[in-house]
Image: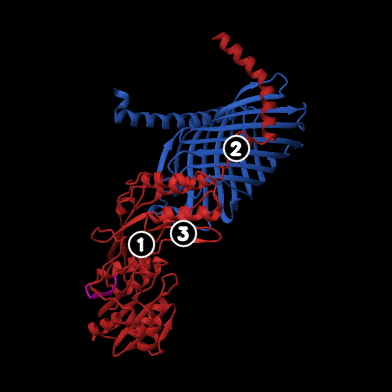
Amino acid sequence: MICNKPEFKVFKICWLYFSWILFVLIFPFKLLCQDNYNGQNKNWNLSTAIIINFCSVTDKNFSALTYRGSSPGAAVALRYEGKHAEHEIAALYIANGNLNTNSSPKAKLNAGIFNIEYVNIYSLYVSPNNSFNCKAGAAIQFLNNSRKFNQFINNDFSFETALSFGAVAQLQYALGKNNNSIILTNRITLPVFSIFSQPSYSGSSAADKEAENGTAFKKLFTNNQTGSFSKFLRVKNQFAINKNFGNRHGISIMYNWEFYKIKTARSVIASNNQAGIQYNYKF
Amino acid sequence: MYLLFFFTYRLLKKLRFIFLIIVIINICSCEKVLQLKEPAITSAAVFEDVWKELDKKYALFSVKNINWDSVYNQSRPQFTAELNNNDLFKRISNMLEVLKDGHVSLISPEKTYTYDNFYTLYLRNFNFINIEKNYLKNQYNKTGPVIYKIVDSIGYLYYSSFRDNISEEDLNTIFNTMTATKGLIVDVRNNGGGSLSNAEKLFSRFINNRKLVKYEVIKKGPAHNDFLDKEAFYISPSGNYYSNKIVLLTNRTCFSACNDFVMYMSYLPNITLVGDQTGGGGSVPANYLLLNGWKLQYSSSVTLSPDNLPVENGIQPDIQIIISPFQEANGIDPILEKAYQLLR
């Protein structure tokens, strides 16, 4: 069968990359230009948020136990809303914090999170009175989570770095009809295909030691592999209640929930619950 | 096609209700939907945790020729009933005894098990009080963790543990003193290992060019023979180079980083190893936290000499000498005396 030939597999991978580039980069860019050309309603929105993150992680490399704890963080996002499409680039940083496990009070897992994502969504449905809308599209997500175990030697460091391409769905509901009404937004992101890296199985090779001190980008190219839901499952749900004050300013209360599961020889299951307050500025 | 659009439109209209459901799920915390479950902590679960972790990560089953599955079959029936912490610790320790590995430890808040038969079953072949009193005459220098003295143009250097860090400045001071000697005795008996970087710093004074010192083979998967290609390790010279004759004194307590140091040194052309075989332990120890909070330590790699030989079971000396209990009781150290004789 031609499908099993290595050349065809290369073709399939190339096609996958090409289609994602087309879908996520070129097509939205075309729509962005189209919006600007037509002079349609458009606005830019800059958001900053302070966040508290509640993390639970089971890293089978360290233990079958789940470590839990909280640490502060911050997020920043730049969003463009046009008639056809909405684009958003967002970054999230959660400072390193100590996670604990009930079975061993002295055992601490120092964990930190860094995420960047680009989302572009298109309007699928707007209710006749504009109070409800539904959007869907695609996202590119970059994730870099690192952990260090305080009581171990040699295999004390672990990380996941992943570049994911996924689908996004967003529902928005306005409680009221004027500009200053309260808006509820819920967005779900589900990566479909991911390139991700972890330390080697033993975590003590020369490449692992280099990766430990290297940048997130460098980690992505260390010991990487590709996978979909069966290998790398990630779900992210973002919920926000927004209240605008005038035409430019807004405050949101946000609650994000993220779950991911890596099913490799170095199995990791983690969930993050993030609560925060966000300030939005339209320009 | 029209029907498809019609139903999609109807569905989207209904989405505002789905939206409300999602909000409710959010408020109830989604983590509860996909909750991370803590496994039950029973004696059997702790045993399984130990056995499985070693089954996946322990690197020396092949080197030590151990059938780990049969260990499971023999041990499992002992963990059917719920055990108190003492009995559980004892039974798991008994199972670990099979591995005969000084890098395998079980650590609970109250107790620590480490395999120690690699030196307790043999003569000590070292008594520092005798050396201090009868050979160093209670007069010696100490820089950092190293004790040293020059007697009749022969240097004596004792490094008791590679856990104690040594700096390049310390080594400069020591080797500036040793430059005038015609030979050097390096005593690493009873050095149970520690940080490999200390061993490497000391070794770097005995070479004048970059040397291949070992290969490390680490696991790449859970199967017992799932290893990555061997990785070569080199050490470069540093500071004052000591080029005269060296006698290295070893015994069974010389373990782990010390075993590696002896292996590195054994490939030098100007060296003689005197004493007893080293204790071995040429692997990188790694750790795991068990379900009940106890810590498990195990060997995660295989170390090979530059000749591709495993050094897990220790390194034989060139001249084997034993200190009998009678000699020790009389303050005599024939190993040290042999070293003086070789360098005189």
Say which chain tag 2 marks.
Answer: B
Instruction: Give the residue number, with chain letter if any, for mark 3.
Output: A153
Under mark 1, the amino acid is Gly
- Is label 2 in a helix, a strand or a loop? loop
Image location of residue B36, percent across then percent down: 58, 40
The residues colored magenta run B269-276
Q: Which disc, if any, is residue A62?
A: none
Q: Work out whether residue A37 can be spotted.
A: no
Residue in the picture at 73% in, 28% down: A174
Q: Quadrant of residue A10?
A: top left
Distance between the Cα atoms at labels 3 and 2?
30 Å
Question: Which quadrant of the figure contains the C terminus of chain A?
Answer: top right
Chain letter, red: B
Q: Amino acid at mark 2?
A: Gln
Q: Which mark is residue B281?
A: 1
Identify whether A166 is placed above or below B246.
above
Q: From the image, which quarter does the N terminus of chain A lie in?
A: top left
* Helix, strand or loop for the magenta stretch, by majority: strand
Name the residue nearer the viewer: A152 or A44: A152
Q: Which chain is blue?
A: A
According to the picture, the residue beneath numbered tag 2 turns out to be B35
Q: What secondary structure is found at the residue carrying circle 1?
A: loop
